[in-house]
Image: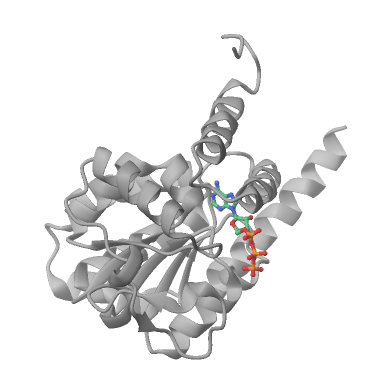
Amino acid sequence: MIPENHPRRESLIIREKVVKALEDGYLAPQGLIAHGRGECFDYLIGEKTQEFAMKAMKAAIAMLLLAKNPVISVNGNMAALVPDDIVRLAEEINAKIEVNLFYRTLDREKKIEEVLKRAGAKEVLGVGDDASAVIPELFSERRRVSKKGIYIADVVLVGLEDGDRTEALVKMGKKVIAIDINPLSRTSQMASLTIVDNIIRVFPKMISLAKEMKKSDKDELQKIINQYNNKEILKESLRFISERMNQLSLSL
Ligand code: ATP
């Protein structure tokens, strides 16, 4: 039981969700390590959504709204942290939802499907035999994807992803939107568009943006994408962290 007045209550509640997902058998133990790495970067960005993430989210929603076949790729961490929001965002942007795991087992796939269906998903791709297409150049079990989903997708939204798969998807000509709070990860560097923020904060904001931006016309959305430069956003995030650390060191 986490005390009501604990200064890091929210972060501890989130940790409990991840631990519960491990106990329920759909998160691999390595997922806990990935989560801890994310917590560390959240300290560095001040545990708030910063301007560079806001700009990236706007461009991401523009990209998703203009996509022909957008897909949200879901792993154990995402299913543990934002199951309801995944389903709500998919509805807003008309995207498919596909399970894709680094440490793939049928049991874990089915459990994630169950979590997403409980959250309201009507269809969950990538489970068992549905993942019969292959992403070239990838040798992990992650290369198996759905013919109706990631294989034919033009835009794929991923969270807490690994760099190799992001690179392989980009090489297949797909636009990859990565939610990764670490601007130095290979995923962040490889993605077409990187949202440097905590996935917990990102999804609710993307849902509101999608509701709003759905009213824009295609030209306006395209303009947002044309003006977006991912390298600049990554640079901005690194500058923000270093300036913030510098200021904090001066205030000690
Ligand atoms: P890469 O190959 O991209 O360098 P990796 O495969 O070693 O990275 P993992 O440890 O699997 O990376 O973690 C995936 C990424 O997700 C990490 O960069 C981590 O900082 C990030 N991450 C962890 N928790 C969150 C979160 N809550 N929100 C956003 N990103 C997160």
Look at the image and tell me whether residue 224 can be seen.
no
Where does the image place residue 125, in percent across and percent down from the top left? 27, 64
Query: Which image quarter holds the C terminus?
Result: top right
Q: Nearer the viewer, residue 146 or 184?
A: 146
Taking the spot 23% from the left edge, 63% from the top edge, the residue there is 96
In the rendered view, tell whether residue 153 sits above or below residue 112: below
Determine which quarter of the picture holds residue 248: top right
In the rendered view, tell whether residue 202 sits above or below residue 175: above
In this rendering, would 118 be left or right of 137?
Answer: left
Q: Nearer the viewer, residue 4 or 96?
A: 96
Q: Nearer the viewer, residue 233 or 98?
A: 98
Where does the image place residue 52, in percent across and percent down from the top left? 51, 58
In the rendered view, tell whether residue 48 sits above or below residue 2: below
Where does the image place residue 98, in percent across and percent down from the top left? 32, 63
Residue found at the far top of this picture: 4
Identify the image's colour scheme: rainbow, by chain, secondary structure or one colour.
Answer: one colour
Query: Which image quarter holds the N terminus?
Result: top right
In the rendered view, tell whether residue 178 sits above or below residue 42: below
Q: Nearer the viewer, residue 17 or 56?
A: 17
Taking the spot 51% from the left edge, 48% from the top edge, the residue there is 77
Taking the spot 66% from the left edge, 18% from the top edge, the residue there is 7
Look at the image and tell me whether residue 98 can be seen.
yes
How many numbered marks, from 0 up? 0
In this rendering, would 35 be left or right of 161?
Answer: right
Where does the image place residue 49, in percent across and percent down from the top left? 50, 45
Q: Quadrant of ligand 1?
A: bottom right
